[in-house]
Image (spheres, rainbow, N blue to C red):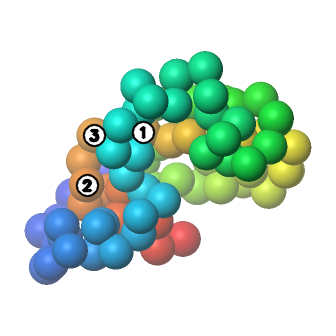
Amino acid sequence: MRRRGVKNLDTRIVAHPEVLIQNPTEHKGKWQNLFNNDNPVYLEIGMGKGQFLLNLAKQNPNINYIGIERYTSVLLRAVQK
């Protein structure tokens, strides 16, 4: 996947508070508080632009999904979707 430089990347990522979980250890064993439900939580590591994760979420609204992406420029593309 080609990554390009994105202007104001950090500012744009921070503008989406649901993107960054600041203290994930605080949620350990208590993810239902973050999602406000008792649905199971699925994790995708290396979510890329998020298309696969987005489709899964649409097909399975009774499952909570968390996606992790190493590159913030790619993460921004997923957030924009």
* Tag 1 residue: 68
Tell me which residue sits at (82%, 35%) in the image: 38
For this orientation, the residue located farthest to the bottom is 7
CA–CA distance in space, label 2 to label 1: 10 Å
The residue type indicated by label 2 comes to Thr
- Residue at coordinates 18% horizontally, 67% vertically from top-left? 10
Kindly check if marks 2 and 3 are in contact, taking CB atoms under 8 A apart as contact. Answer: no
Q: Is residue 6 left or right of residue 63?
A: left
Neighbourhood count class around disc 3 (C-alpha, 10 Å): few under 14, some 14–19, many 20 upward: few
Instruction: Tell me the amino acid under the disc marked 3.
Output: Arg
Question: Rounded to the nearest whole Å, what is the CA distance between mark 1 and mark 3?
Answer: 7 Å
Locate the C terminus and report the quarter of the image it occupies.
bottom right
**Element marked by disc 3:** loop
Left or right: where 55 falls relative to 43: right
x and y percentages locating residue 44 in the rendered image:
54, 33
In front of the other: 18 or 72: 18
Residue occupying the point 28% across, 40% down: 70
**What percent of the width, then of the height, locates residue 74?**
32, 56
Is label 1 in contact with label 3 (beta carbons under 8 Å)?
yes
Check disc 3 and report the residue beneath it: 70
In the picture shown, does residue 2 fall above or below 12? Answer: above
Amino acid type at mark 1: Ile
Q: Where is residue 27 shown, x and y percent of the image?
A: 51, 31
Is residue 60 something that shows in the picture? no
Q: Which residue in the protein does label 2 denote?
A: 72
Q: Are marks 2 and 1 in contact (CB under 8 Å)?
A: no
